[in-house]
Image: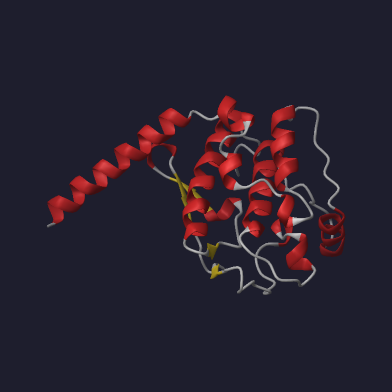
């Protein structure tokens, strides 16, 4: 993203699909990442995404909502800024911001000052350039929702038409298999 600024929607959808898989795993373990952003996403062999920097990650359950203000300003969800308890749905907001940044080239609430950015996040005024497809707009708009309960769950994100129409899911899954087989073979050789 640093070189290209804007990714093709086919490429971005593949990364979103992979990020959904990573977040689904974390959330199944009651872990929230809390700092999804381009700098914390590594692209490895075969274009396989790896989620990095778990410095802000934490356990979160229904009875143990988090309240810490942490992460990167452009990606902070309104509930974090408002100081109310939050859960894994905070990562859904970040996923929406990340998706927007991949296809637009900057975060949706990018502003000259921190205070302006905070006001835009709290106001949740989303606007899209004309070159963003309607299905990308729909997905992002369903993730970047002020009310966390209204955010599209990860299971529905991977079934969204934008992912289905743009991500090469079969190829991504095959590449995961190649890496897993390679890892198993290398691990056996070490023993």
For residue 170, above or below residue 143: above
Q: Residue at x 55, y 32 (%)?
A: 11
Q: Is residue 38 above or below residue 62?
A: above
| Vertical comparison of 55 with 99: above or below | below
Percent x, y for residue 132?
74, 30
Q: Quadrant of residue 139?
A: top right
Say if 10 sits above or below 73 in the image: above
List x then y, in percent, for residue 2: 60, 44
Which residue is depicted at the point 13% across and 51% down?
A: 189
- Farthest residue in the front direction? 63
Q: Position of residue 6 (x, y in %)?
A: 66, 36
Q: Residue at x 20, y 49 (%)?
A: 186
Considering every residue shown, the one lying at the far top of the view is 165
Residue 180 shows up from this direction: yes
Displayed quadrant of residue 158: top right
Q: Say which residue appears at 54% left-offset and 55% top-offset.
A: 40
Q: In this orientation, does residue 8 appear?
A: no
* Residue 166 percent location from the top left of the image: 58, 27
Quadrant in which the N terminus appears: top right
User: Would you say 182 lies left or right of 69 here?
Assistant: left
Quadrant for the C terminus in the image: bottom left
């Amino acid at each position: 993203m640093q070189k290209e600024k804007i990714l093709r929607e086919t490429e971005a959808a593949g990364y979103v699909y992979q990020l959904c898989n990573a977040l689904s795993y974390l959330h199944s373990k009651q872990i929230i990442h809390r700092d999804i952003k381009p700098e914390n996403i590594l692209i490895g062999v075969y274009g396989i995404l790896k989620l990095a920097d778990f410095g802000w990650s934490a356990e979160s359950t229904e009875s143990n909502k988090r309240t810490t203000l942490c992460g990167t300003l452009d990606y902070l969800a309104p509930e974090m800024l408002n100081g109310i308890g939050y859960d894994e749905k905070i990562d859904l907001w970040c996923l929406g911001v990340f998706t927007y940044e991949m296809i637009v080239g900057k975060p949706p609430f990018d502003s000259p000052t921190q205070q302006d950015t905070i006001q835009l996040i709290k106001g949740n005024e989303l606007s899209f350039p004309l070159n963003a497809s309607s299905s990308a707009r729909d997905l992002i708009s369903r993730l970047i929702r002020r009310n966390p309960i209204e955010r599209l769950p990860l299971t529905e994100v991977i079934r969204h038409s934008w992912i289905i129409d743009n991500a090469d899911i079969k190829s991504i899954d095959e590449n995961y298999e190649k890496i897993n087989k390679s890892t198993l073979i290398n691990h056996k050789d070490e023993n």
